[in-house]
Image (tube, grey):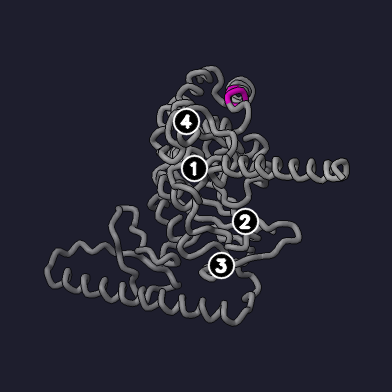
Amino acid sequence: MAAQGWPLSLWLWLSLLLSLLLGARAAAARWSGAGTTPHLQSIFLGRCAEYTTLLSLQPGHQNCTAIWEAFKAVLDKDPCSVLPSDYDLFINLSRHSLPRDKSLFWENNHLLVTSFAENARRLMPLCDVLYGKVGDFLSWCRQENASGLDYQSCPTSEDCENNAVDSYWKRASMQYSRDSSGVINVMLNGSEPTGAYPVKGFFADFEIPYLQKDKITRIEIWVMHEVGGPIVFSKLIYILEAKFAIIERVEEDTLGLSHSPDRSGKHGRIQEGEENGEREREDDDDDDDDDEEEEEEEEEEEEEEEEEEEEEEEEEEEDYWASGKRGRKGSIYFGTKQLLRMMSGVKQPRGVSLRLLWRT
C-alpha cells in the first residue's frame, strides 16, 4: 500500500511546488507592462554607436557614453515618478538637426512607418532620430522598493502616468516636433477600429502643440489601410470634396478661420458687382467713428453666420453618418474636424497649405 501511495504523494508535492512557484512569479509581476529589456545598456550603446558612425547625417560629435549616463539617471528614480523633464540632459546630448521636409508623424502603425521610412532614406520618423532610435521597442524601470532594474514588469499608462517609458517618449516627441521643418508628413491608420486619429495620444498631446508654425510650409496627411482590413471612419469625419482625391490647399474659410489679409497685412472686404467675376480687396483706412461701428457690427454678423454654418455642417454630418451612406464620388473622408482645426492652428500665416492624401 505504501508503494502504491508514493507516486500519488509525489505528484501532490510537485503540484504544490509548481503552484507556489507560479504564485511567486505572479506576485513579482507588480506592473502591467513588460519588464526591463535584458542587456539594456549593451543594446543602447550598440544602437548609438551604429547611428553615429553609419546612419547619422552628422556623425562624430555625439558621445554615446555620456548619452547613456544621462539616460541612466532615470533608472535610479521610483518607477512611477519619472517626468519628461528628467530626460532633458539626455535629449540635449543626443539631439541633432533634422533634414527639412522629412519628418514623419504617425499613430497606430509603427511597423508600417519604420518599413516605409527605410532607415531615414525616404523619411525620418522619431524612431530614426538618435534620441528615439536608442529606446525604440525597449522597456526599462527601477524596482519599486529596491535598487536595481525590474526585469519582471514595468508600469504603463494603465498603472501610473509618470512611468519611465511614457515620459521618455513624451519628451522625445516634444523635441522632435520643435525640430521639424518644411513639409510635415503624417501617416494614420485608416483601419484602426477606434478611428484614424486618436483624440488623446502622443500625436495630439505631445507633437501637434509643439510644432513651430514659422518653420512649416505644408502638412501632408496620409490615411493608410491594412490590406484586406476594414475602412473605419470616425463619426466626426470631415468631408472634403476633391476632383482628383487630393486637396492641394484647404482654404481658411473652409476651416472656419478669418479671411486672409492682403499683401500689406491689412484685412479687406470683397467688393460686389465686379466685372468678369474678379474680386478686389479694398483697405479700410477711414478712421471715422461711424465706419468703425459699422465694421464692428459687420464682424459680429459674420461671426454669427459662421457659427450658424458650423452648426448646420455638424447637423448635416450627423445625418450623413446616420444614413450609413459613403457619400458622393470624388469625396475624401478624413481625420476629424478637430484634427483639421488643430493642424490649421500651426499653419504659417499666408504660406502654409494643408494637403490630404487618401491611400488604400
Does label 4 or label 3 sit earlier along the sequence? 4
Give the distance between the C-alpha atoms of the residues marked 1 and 2, in whole angstroms.
Answer: 21 Å
Identify which residue is drawn at 52% across, 46% down.
156
Q: Are marks 3 and 2 in contact (CB under 8 Å)?
A: no
Label 2 near label 4: C-beta < 8 Å?
Answer: no
Q: Look at the image and give the residue range highlighted in magenta.
A: 41-45
- Local crowd size for mark 4, using a 10 Å CA cut-off: few (<14), some (14–19), many (≥20): few
Q: Quadrant of residue 280?
A: bottom left
Q: Amino acid at mark 2?
A: Asn
Task: Assign a secondary structure to mark 1.
Answer: helix
Assess disc 2: are there few (<14), some (14-19) or many (≥20) residues with their C-alpha within 10 Å of its C-alpha: many
Q: Secondary structure at mark 3?
A: loop
Can you give x and y, in whole percent of width and height, for residue 170 in the image? 46, 42
Q: Any mark on residue 189, and which? A: 2
Instruction: Name the disc covering residue 166, or none.
Output: 1
Q: Indicate the amino acid at tag 3.
A: Ser
Q: Secondary structure at mark 2?
A: strand
Q: Residues within 10 Å of mark 1 (few under 14, many from 20)?
A: many
Comparing labels 4 and 2, the label whose residue is closer to the camera: 4
Label 4 sits on what residue type?
Ala
- Give the number of the disc on residue 146: 4
